[in-house]
Amino acid sequence: MIKEIFLVPDMHCSSCVMRLEGLEDYLPAVKRVKASYRKQQVEVEYDETGLTSGEIADAIRKLGYTVA
């Protein structure tokens, strides 16, 4: 299990948080997501055998956000 933080500078409200925390529904290897619009970051805990950090970043981009 790996925990990684992604900086998402264009996350600005609680709706953004809810949308990004929905990554658990789209990526089965993701075990936990905690997003904060105040910190502009998304903390993701995932199984590294089923997913890479690049795939998570791509999924965040597909939701319409920038990953710094």
Image (spheres, grey):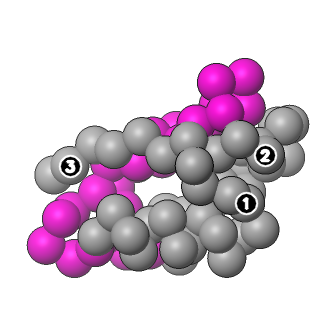
Range of magenta residues: 27-51
Give the vertical position of 13 relative to 25 (above or below): above
Kindly indicate the quadrant of the structure image that contains residue 22. Answer: bottom right
| Amino acid type at image mark 1 | Tyr
Which residue appears farthest toward the front when viewing the image?
68
> Could you tell me residue 66's position as x and y percent?
68, 58
Could you tell which of marks 3 and 1 lies nearer the N-terminus? 3
- In the rendered structure, are the residues bearing label 2 and label 1 in contact, judged by CB atoms less than 8 Å apart? yes
**Going 57% across and 49% down the picture, which residue do you hit?**
68
Give the Cα distance between marks 3 and 1: 22 Å
Q: Secondary structure at mark 1?
A: loop
> Which of the numbered marks, if any, corresponds to residue 38?
none
Above-or-below relation of 37 to 52: above
* Residue 25 as seen in the image, left or right of residue 49: right
| Distance in Å between CA atoms under marks 3 and 2 | 24 Å
Residue 17 in percent (x, y) is at 72, 43
Q: Is residue 21 among what the camera can see?
A: no
Identify residue for label 2.
10
Sequence order check: which comes first, mark 3 or mark 2? 3
Mark nearer the viewer, 3 or 1: 1
Residue 19 appears in which quarter of the rendering?
bottom right
Q: Amino acid at mark 2?
A: Asp
The residue beneath circle 1 is 65
Indicate which disc, 2 or 1, sits on the residue closer to the N terminus. Answer: 2
Residue identified by numbered label 3:
2
- In the image, taking residue 37 as reference, residue 3 lies left or right, namely left
**Residue 9 percent across, percent down from the top left:** 71, 41
Residue at 28% x, 73% y is 51
Badge 3 amino acid = Ile
